[in-house]
Image (tube, grey):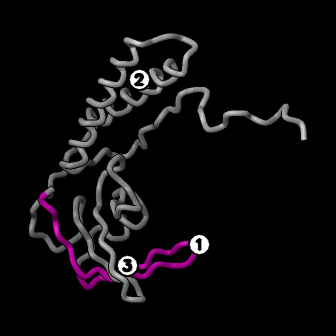
């Protein structure tokens, strides 16, 4: 096979990746806002360190470009953040910031936290408020059933607890 069309180092990007804001309202939890601010501080420090060592043509130049692009994104996210602070509320219905415990048809339990886009982490059970599952849960109360239709099979969940963590 000819090597003419094979990239030798395909793991390393040749140009920086630009992150785009979704265009939806940037709702954040208190913890989510703190994470955004921490990311800005981390990127500011990284950028400063890379500027000191700047040498065009080295991988550091790409790292610097990426740090600057990421810093611009996160600074924009902090500026556009709409804090929704529902910590500690005693509400029964699912709103932004709620921790929602559900059971599936087999009786398996799972807890989801409804958070902002940048705080979302599906593996950790943190759902972007605009995701299909979070959207299906919003406004519901314990005892409600939620049917999420998917190509790979529908998900039928029963909400059995809603709380608003202090985090």
Mark with earlier residue (2, 1): 2
Q: What residue sits 34% from the left and 58% below the top?
A: 129
Q: CA distance from mark 1 to mark 3?
A: 16 Å
Count of marks overlaid on the render: 3
Q: Position of residue 109 (x, y in %)?
A: 33, 80
Which quarter of the rendering shows the N terminus? top right
Quarter assignment of residue 87: bottom left
Q: Nearer the viewer, residue 35 or 25?
A: 35
Seen as rendered, the residue at the extreme right is 1
On the image, numbered disc 1 is attached to which residue?
151
Q: Residues within 10 Å of mark 1 (few under 14, many from 20)?
A: few
What numbered label is drawn on residue 140?
none
Q: Is residue 55 left or right of residue 166?
A: right
Q: Does the magenta portion include 163?
A: yes
Q: Residues within 10 Å of mark 2 (few under 14, many from 20)?
A: some
Q: Which residues are magenta?
A: 142-166
Q: What residue sits 53% from the left and 72% below the top?
A: 150
Closer to the eye: label 2 or 3: 2
Is disc 1 in contact with disc 3, using a CB cutoff of under 8 Å?
no
Q: Position of residue 139 (x, y in %)?
A: 26, 70
Is disc 2 in contact with disc 3, using a CB cutoff of under 8 Å?
no
Q: Does the magenta portion include 132?
A: no
Mark with earlier residue (1, 3): 3
Q: Position of residue 85 (x, y in %)?
A: 15, 52
What numbered label is drawn on residue 146?
3
Which quarter of the rendering shows the C terminus? bottom left
Q: What residue sits 32% from the left and 45% below the top?
A: 25
On the image, numbered disc 2 is attached to which residue?
68
Q: CA distance from mark 2 to mark 3?
A: 42 Å
Q: Residues within 10 Å of mark 3 (few under 14, many from 20)?
A: some
Q: Is residue 111 left or right of residue 86?
A: right
Q: CA distance from mark 2 to mark 1?
A: 39 Å
């Amino acid at each position: 096979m000819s090597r003419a069309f094979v990239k030798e180092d395909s793991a390393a990007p040749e140009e920086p990746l630009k992150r785009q804001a979704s265009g939806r309202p940037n709702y954040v939890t208190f913890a989510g806002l703190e994470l955004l601010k921490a990311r800005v501080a981390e990127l500011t420090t990284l950028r400063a360190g890379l500027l000191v060592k700047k040498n065009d043509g080295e991988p550091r130049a790409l790292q610097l470009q990426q740090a600057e692009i990421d810093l611009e994104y996160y600074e924009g996210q902090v500026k556009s953040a709409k804090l929704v602070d529902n910590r500690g509320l005693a509400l029964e219905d699912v709103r932004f910031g709620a921790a929602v415990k559900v059971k599936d048809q087999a009786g398996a339990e799972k807890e989801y936290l409804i958070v902002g886009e940048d705080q979302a982490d599906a593996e950790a059970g943190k759902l972007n408020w605009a995701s299909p599952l979070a959207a299906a849960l919003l406004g519901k109360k314990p005892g409600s059933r939620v049917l999420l239709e998917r190509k790979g099979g529908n998900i039928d969940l029963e909400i059995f607890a809603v709380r608003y963590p202090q985090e």
